[in-house]
Image (cartoon, helix red, strand yellow):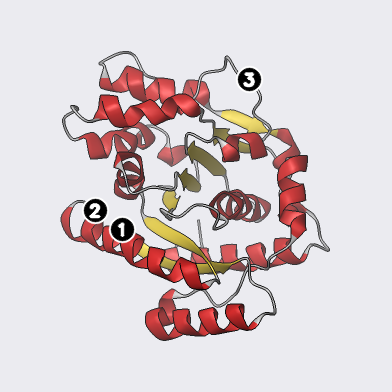
């Protein structure tokens, strides 16, 4: 059975989409079968994968059909990103923002994504969910569906406060809805050689101990360029960030206990 990993943080601009894409790319490079699920109405992962079909079906339509009792088939919206080693992905668009409204009256609304992914999880070694920057019902769905969660966090002073809210939510989900959810760890992102980065990293280590991943993800304009070029840096042998994410992916496999998939 494939492992489902949510990449979550209610704060935007922390490298969440970059982490989801590069984790998927690194795992795909290690001969794992990967599916990326864009669960953010902004659709950044979809754009990264090369999705540009404005009239194409997305996760939004599948969820709405499912909760309204229609014939929802999640396999119909799976796409392939040829420029990213043929990673499979499910795109999203702005219409997903309306899900908060039509899910509010649905029975067991926090389990909708879990039920949909159960149909396909055996087809993949890893399903990676890129969550929206919020603490709403969509993120709750991702955490309930997931076997593990990774929280990317900038190595900046203002990112520390946001960590408490998301780690509290993870704890609540573990204790009330999804006791099997593993808190895989916090990934320090956008790190540089400044005192701020070093001090923040030290505070993370002091506060969270082994939950902090041992590597930092460097701050670099090449990440923005890779998004523009719609190709993950893991596929470039001389990319520093690509190398960092490959090490991160290996550690994720170790922590989730899926090294031999």
Q: Position of residue 254 (x, y in %)?
A: 49, 69
Q: Is residue 183 above or below residue 40?
A: below
Say few, some or many: other residues with alpha carbon within 10 Å of mark 3 (under 14 / 14 to 19 / 20 or more).
few
Query: Which residue, given by chain and number where applicable, does mark 3 sit on?
Result: 53
At horizontal 50% and vertical 42% (from top left) the residue drawn is: 124
Query: Which residue, given by chain and number where applicable, does mark 1 sit on?
Result: 181
Q: Earlier in the sequence, mark 3 or mark 1?
A: 3
Q: Residue 178 carries which label?
A: 2
Quadrant of the rendered image containing residue 49: top right
Q: How many marks?
A: 3
Alpha carbon of mark 1 to alpha carbon of mark 2: how far? Answer: 6 Å
Q: Where is residue 70 in the image (x, y as percent from the top left)?
A: 30, 13
Q: In this view, does 150 lie above or below 129?
A: below
Q: In this view, does 22 lie above or below 52?
A: below
At horizontal 54% and vertical 28% (from top left) the residue drawn is: 78
Q: Where is residue 219 in the image (x, y as percent from the top left)?
A: 68, 65
The answer to whether residue 130 of the structure is visible from this angle is: yes
């Amino acid at each position: 059975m494939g492992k489902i990993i949510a990449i979550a943080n209610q704060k935007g601009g922390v490298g969440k989409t970059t982490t989801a894409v590069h984790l998927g790319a690194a795992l795909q490079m290690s001969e794992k079968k990967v599916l990326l699920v864009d669960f953010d109405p902004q659709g950044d992962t979809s754009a990264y994968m090369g999705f540009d079909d404005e009239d194409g079906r997305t996760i939004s339509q599948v969820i709405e059909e499912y909760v309204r009792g229609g014939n929802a088939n999640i396999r119909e919206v799976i796409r392939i990103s040829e420029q990213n080693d043929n990673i499979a992905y499910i795109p999203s668009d702005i219409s997903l923002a309306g899900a908060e409204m039509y899910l509010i009256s649905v029975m067991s609304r926090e389990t909708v994504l879990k039920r949909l992914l159960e149909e396909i999880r055996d087809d993949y070694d890893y399903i990676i969910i890129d969550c929206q920057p919020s603490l709403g019902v969509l993120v709750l769905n991702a955490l309930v569906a997931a076997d593990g969660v990774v929280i990317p966090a900038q190595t900046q002073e203002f990112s520390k406060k946001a960590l408490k809210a998301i780690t509290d939510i993870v704890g609540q989900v573990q204790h009330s809805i999804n006791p099997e959810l593993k808190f895989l760890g916090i990934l320090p992102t956008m790190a540089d050689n400044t005192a701020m980065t070093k001090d923040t990293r030290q505070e993370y280590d002091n506060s969270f101990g082994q939950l902090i991943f041992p590597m930092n993800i460097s701050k670099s304009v090449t990440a923005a360029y890779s998004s523009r070029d719609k190709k993950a840096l893991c596929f470039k042998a001389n990319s520093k960030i690509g190398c960092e994410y490959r090490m991160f992916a290996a550690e994720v496999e170790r922590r989730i206990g899926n090294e031999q998939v």
